[in-house]
Image (spheres, coloured by chain):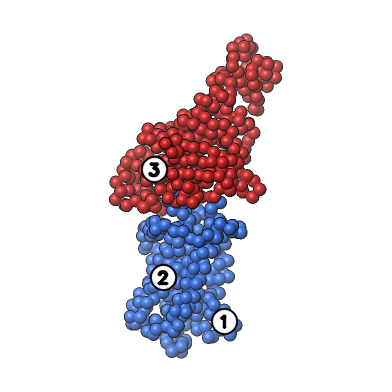
Amino acid sequence: MEALLDIHDLRKSYGSTEVIRGISLALARGECYGLLGPNGAGKTTTLRLCLGLTDPDAGTITLAGLPVPRAAREARLRLGVVPQMDSLDPDFTVTENLVVYGRYFGLADRTIRARVPELLEFAGLGNKAQAPIPSLSGGMKRRLSLARALVNDPDIVFLDEPTTGLDPQARHLIWERLKQLLGQGKTLLLTTHFMDEAERLCDRLSVMDAGRIVASGSPRELIDDHIEPEVIEVYGDGAAEWGDEVGRRLSDRCERTGETVFCYTRAARPLMQDLESRGSLKYLHRPANLEDVFLKLTGRDLRD
Amino acid sequence: MRIPRRKDWRPPRVSIRFVHVWRRNFLVWRKLAFTSVLGNLADPMMYMLGLGFGLGALMPEVNGTRYIVFLAAGTVAYSTMNSATFEALYSAFSRMQIQKTWEAIMIAPLDLDDIVLAEALWAATKATLSGAAILVIIWVLGLSHSALTLWILPIAFLAGLTFACLALVMNAISPSYDFFLYYFTLVMTPMTLLCGVFFPVDQLPQALQAISVALPLYHAIALVRPLVAGAIPGAPLLHVAVLIAYGVAGFYLALVLSRRRLLV
């Protein structure tokens, strides 16, 4: 089946800085695809290019079967977008926001109003239909943004860091709703820098860094392919010295960030025995996760 | 302000769905209509009545009419211009920059071209309401009884569209609200004083009269004033053509500069 979004060798420069350096990816119908990357990796620029809000210097984009940017306006008829910053209309109530937005898609008021209760129910805003926007919490606003993105019953939804700035309860609710959408057969493209979010939701994902895709695959594949299966984190007084003397010798790879030593290994036993015999160091033994892959691929330096 | 790129100069491409952006602004206005109408009406009306009766009492007739009638015609054009300009500067800027309304619309199946057109038409709509409000005062006070004054409504819409397009150029290059003060001080105020709102243009030195003729407000007033007096304006097509020319040029430039600003 034709991909809902197909990007080939996309490039974009601002002045002399090339911010997107040859990105290709294709989204299959019904999957959740994640774009992961540190700040400035080019995730949001990639989304803007796919929306036709800015023109690529080179490469092709096909969205819902139409060429972007040339036919971007028509392609967006089949698309929903949850932007990073909420852009709800503060002058309108919750319901008015949905009705006015639905009109932009050429939908009749009758059609939109018939959908509103279902959308509000989905967003957990059933009792907020007439509420003014300034009275909503951050989580409610984000859920309304999600409902707004669904007003045209889209085939594919872009979500740009959908849970950034939300508390854990609100994040879990958004995740649950996104899973429901996947259950309905919607295709999702998600940018995030939360690894647990990507690991939970994404069927496939690409790790981006400095405008390139540095690795792609399912979360499991990325962990299996790029990193040792077990991690021991050692922290507190004496951790650094222990890392230099023992950790480095007994693990496949040993990294230090501040006071914490990360030992990546295929065989944790010797390390554990050493740590247990000392009894003075604090440590945590856990399976490797996507965050470990991410940090290995994009480095531990701050990006801002 | 950044220099427009080659692609920013492409001709406008509009979807008929732009009307829903106009409707969005109309729906907001309807919620605040009372305050808005009060603002449209009260301020220009006080000037018109205060100056018209106060100053008018000290004056003989101006160009063969009572001063208040002379001023009323100028006020229609002035209040139309002001209303379009305020809407296309402050209100459009807050929708573009502060509330991110434009951003939300551009991720729906509408383009910036649709938004700029809708904003211009919406500001023209508000300008027409302002012109109409002054016209009602003119009728109520019996300053004019001519049915020809009904022509003022389409003229107010056209002039409103022209001034809205010019203001949208400023909107596209403005870093903040404060920037608009330049436009008022350097463009709007001189234009108001040069174009015959408060006194006949022929009172000005020759050189200033020449400038006056080149400004859009002059031509709006040249259409409105005879109609208030119950006469058909001279060379109406010329005045209409000047307003259209300013409007088309302003719209295109506003579009190019808005693209440069937002489609990056």
- Write down the quadrant of residue A121 in the picture: top left
Question: How far across and how far down the image is residue B194, in percent?
Answer: 54, 78
Q: Which residue sits furthest front?
A: A1
Left or right of B84, for residue A245: right
Q: CA distance from mark 2 to mark 1?
A: 26 Å
Chain label for disc 2:
B
Residue B100 visible in the picture: no
Whether residues under marks 3 and 1 lie with C-beta atoms below 8 angstroms apart, the answer is no
For residue A278, above or below residue B242:
above
* In front of the other: B92 or B21: B21
Residue A202 visible in the picture: yes
Q: Which residue is mark 1?
A: B210
Q: Report the amino acid beneath label 2.
A: Phe
For residue A275, above or below residue A175:
above
Q: CA distance from mark 3 to mark 2?
A: 38 Å
Q: Residue at x 48, y 63 (%)?
A: B88
Chain the render paints red: A
Q: Is the residue marked by circle 3 packed among few (<14), some (14-19), or many (20+) residues within 10 Å?
A: some
Left or right of B206, for residue A169: left
